[in-house]
Amino acid sequence: MVAAASGFKEKSQRIVPQWILEGNQEVRCAFTRGFFDADGYYHIRPEEADYRVRFGQSDPVVLEGIRDILCREGFKCSKVLGPYKSKQEAKPYYELHLHGRMQMQRFHRKIRPCHPDKACI
């Protein structure tokens, strides 16, 4: 009998599962694609020459895993930033950024987001 893989959403402190971190490029990119589709967006302000791929998440450890994947794929990432709070009673959240138009375009080509609002840049 094969043991089920540890679930990402089932843990009290979520982490990127080791089998994904150690998986091949296709597995790592697919996980990043799904994560970006759910918790990421493109921040585009051409008038300020500000182009970013941004991920937001309440679990900084998860963002560290995403950062690890992106660095393995040759991207230059920010450190995990935060904690930030939008309101006093809100749960803190963290962010991870890729800066620059070239990195954004490369991210889009390599990761290939599927969310209809994020599929075009």
Image (cartoon, rainbow, N blue to C red):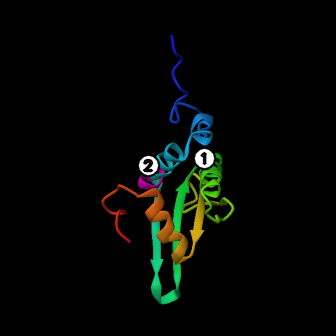
Q: Earlier in the sequence, mark 2 or mark 1?
A: 2
Residue at 61% in and 40% down: 15
| Residue nearer the viewer, 26 or 96 | 26
- Disc 1, SS: helix
| Residue nearer the viewer, 83 or 67 | 67
Using a 10 Å C-alpha cutoff, classify the residue at mark 1 as few (fewer than 14 neighbours), some (14 to 19) or many (20 or more).
many
Nearest-to-viewer mark from 2 and 1 = 2
Q: Amino acid under label 1?
A: Val
Q: Position of residue 41 (x, y in %)?
A: 45, 64
Check the image and report above or below for 68 versus 119.
above
- Within the image, what quadrant is residue 109 found in? bottom left
**Would you name the residue on which mark 1 appears?**
62
Magenta residues: mostly which secondary structure? helix
**Quadrant including the C terminus:** bottom left
What's the distance in space between the residues labelled 2 and 1, CA to CA?
13 Å
- Within the image, what quadrant is residue 19 found in? top right
Q: Amino acid under label 2?
A: Gly
Residue at 59% in and 36% down: 17
Q: Tell me where the magenta segment starts and ends, as one range.
A: 34-38
Residue at 47% in and 71% down: 105
